[in-house]
Image (spheres, helix red, strand yellow):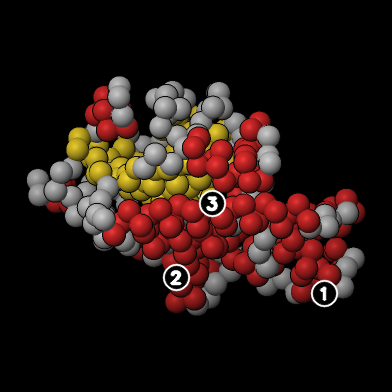
Amino acid sequence: MNNLKDMLKEIGYTNCLNCTKYSPAGNAFYIDNEDYKGMYWYYETDSFIIDIHDFFIKREMIVDTFPDMRPYMSFISTYIITASGEWFNPYQNIVSNTMFVTNIDRSNMRLLLHGNYPYFSVGINFKEKMIEEYVIDNLKINKTKVSDLFLETREFITKPIEKLAKTILNCSMDLPSADLFFEAKAKEWLSITIDEYTKKSREHPLSESDKNAIENVSEYINDHYAFDIPQELLEKIAMMSGTKLKSAFKQKYQMSITEYTQRKRMNIAENLLLTTELEIKDIAKSVGYNSHSRFTALFKRYKGMYPKEVKQFSSKNPFPICCCENKK
């Protein structure tokens, strides 16, 4: 196979020549098999590939065999808009509003995606040329340590990358303006990663006792997420002042205690929406919300869709993803 386009055709994708869902500067491909259906869009240069995965996973699937992507890219950095699954080696939770990163050279890669759910993401796949120019040469990082740059910053760059990913997703430019736009976005994506890596290298780490104290707080929240937990109680659990608790918690988890609690509640709610017949209002109450509108707003914020949309998912009749499908 000479290029990515040939590789996609080889594994069952069909070229969508007239697709208008994403930028016409890229290439769109469609697939519909027993496990999943949807679109893969990409824009490629000699330094990077920007791509969009827009799929509906029909049934739970474990992927342990991948096509050889080394001729096309070196490192994958992806913002997950909506998904439900796990990546192994190293373990990463593949859920909505998170970052997924991996080194293409890794062996024993495995992916588990849960069925009856979308997989929707925007990513930058950096080629060796860009990694060498901006990471290895400029930062003087040993090639074997480049993975650390992406893995150690993964949980800390979600918010700035989210904004960047959405600008890519909404781009309707064609050539030649799209060339300038996508090059700028790829460099900005990498610059955000590098900036966070350099800041972390200068950061004073939490002591082991403080780490343990914060982990006690997070475990308590995990076990009591549906209740209103007083700040004073968490301070007593951590044996910290309110100011120190907030600061240390933010340093460890890159989010406030409030956001951590809300994310925990939304993850539980998402599972209940997918696996039970409970009404949305009852699910809202079960995770701590008497206000249906408040629950709906938070679910949309963290999961990228409304609870009623999750309820409507059906592997037998999932929503159309590709404009080519709409023409059938």
Circle 1 packing at 10 Å, graded few (<14), some (14-19), many (20+), is some
Residue located 90% across and 65% down the image: 239
Q: Is residue 315 above or below residue 88?
A: below
Residue 47 higher or lower than 70, as above or below: below
Q: Is residue 196 left or right of residue 278?
A: right
| Marks 2,1: beta carbons within 8 A | no
Q: CA distance from mark 3 to mark 2?
A: 34 Å
Q: Which residue is mark 1?
A: 242
Residue 37, quarter of the rendered image: top left
**SS at circle 3:** helix
Foreground: disc 1 or disc 3: 3
Nearest to N terminus: mark 1 or mark 3: 3
Q: Amino acid at mark 1?
A: Gly
> Which is nearer the eye, 178 or 262?
178
Q: Secondary structure at mark 2?
A: helix
Q: Is residue 46 left or right of residue 31?
A: right
Q: Which mark is residue 190?
A: 3
> Residue 8: which quarter of the image?
top left
Q: Secondary structure at mark 1?
A: helix
Q: Is residue 188 visible?
A: yes
Image spot of residue 260 (x, y percent):
64, 63
Q: Which residue is mark 2?
A: 296
Residue type, numbered disc 3: Leu
Residue 31: x, y in percent?
24, 37
Disc number lying in front (2 or 1): 1
Marks 3 and 2, the one that precedes in the sequence: 3
Q: Nearer the viewer, residue 181 or 81?
A: 181
Report, in whole angstroms, how far the alpha carbon at label 1 lies from the one at label 3: 35 Å
Q: Which badge, 2 or 1, is on the more N-terminal residue?
A: 1
Residue at 56%, 55% (x, y): give it. Answer: 191
Residue visible at 35% across and 57% down? Answer: 180
Direction from residue 224 to residue 322 in the image, left or right: left
